[in-house]
Amino acid sequence: MKVGLFFGSFNPIHVGHMVIANYMLEFTDLERIWFVVSPQNPLKQKSSLLDEKQRLHMVNLAIGDSNKYKASNIEFKLPQPSYTINTLTHLREKYPQHQFALIMGADNLQSFHKWKNYEEILKHYELYVYPRVNGNGGELMNHKKVKLVGAPLVEISSTEIRSAIKEKKDMRYFMNSEVWEYLKSMHFYENK
C-alpha cells in the first residue's frame, strides 16, 4: 500500500489540511494518508504548541470514521526534536509492507535542503508537493523524486486561526465542526 505522510503540528488542524489530504488521495496514486502529528518541529518554538495529545485528538475528530486517513502519534515515542529521517526509518522498519511518500507544500520544499539527511530522504522516498503562495519549491522542484501535484491553493494558516480565536473571532468554518466544538469547549488558544 502506498501511504502519503502528511507531517505537521496541526495546531489546530483546519479545512486547508483536509482539502490537501483529500486531493492527494483522490488525484494521485496514494492509497492512504497518515497525518503525522509532530510533538516538536525543530524549526518551530515549542511554547506555541498545544499539548500533542490534544492536537492528535483534534486530528482524529477531523478524520471521523474514514478508513483512508489515520492520525499517527509515531513521533511521540521518538527522541525530540523530531527529525523526518528518523521517523521514516522507524516507519519503514515497523511497516515494511507499506511504501511511504511525503506530502509537503512548495514552501517546505524550498527549505528542504536544510532538513537533516535530506539527500537520504530523496534517495528513498517520493515527495508529493502542493502549491503555496509563498514558495516556488526552489532548486529541488525538478528533482526526479519530486511530484508536483496541482492541488488547490489553500491559504489558511493555523497561526492566523489561533490569533483570530484570541481576538474572539468566530472561526468555526475554518475547521471540521467537531474540532471547532472541542476547541471551544476546552477554551484552546483563547489566551495564547
Image (spheres, rainbow, N blue to C red):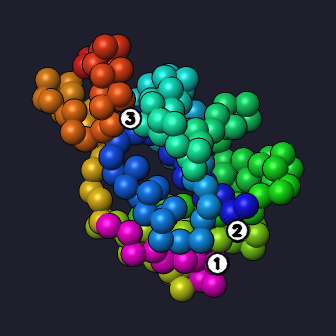
Question: Mark 3 and mark 2: span between their CA atoms?
Answer: 27 Å
Q: Give the position of the N terminus as an image quadrant.
A: bottom right
Q: Rate crowding at label 1 as few (under 14), some (14 to 19) or many (20 or more) other CA atoms within 10 Å.
A: some
- What residue type is disc 3 on? Pro
Kindly tell me whether residue 42 is visible in this rendering: no
Name the residue carrying label 3: 12
Question: In the figure, 150 relative to 183: above or below?
Answer: below
- What residue type is disc 2 on? Tyr
Question: Mark 2 and mark 1: span between their CA atoms?
Answer: 7 Å
Instruction: Determine the residue positioned at 47% across, 71% down.
Output: 27
Q: Rate crowding at label 3 as few (under 14), some (14 to 19) or many (20 or more) other CA atoms within 10 Å.
A: many
Q: Is residue 152 left or right of residue 29?
A: left
Instruction: Determine the residue positioned at 55% across, 23% down.
Output: 53
Q: Which mark is residue 125?
A: 2
Q: Main secondary structure of the magenta part?
A: loop
Instruction: Determine the residue positioned at 21% across, 28% down.
Output: 165
Circles 2 and 1, Cβ within 8 Å, touching? The answer is: yes
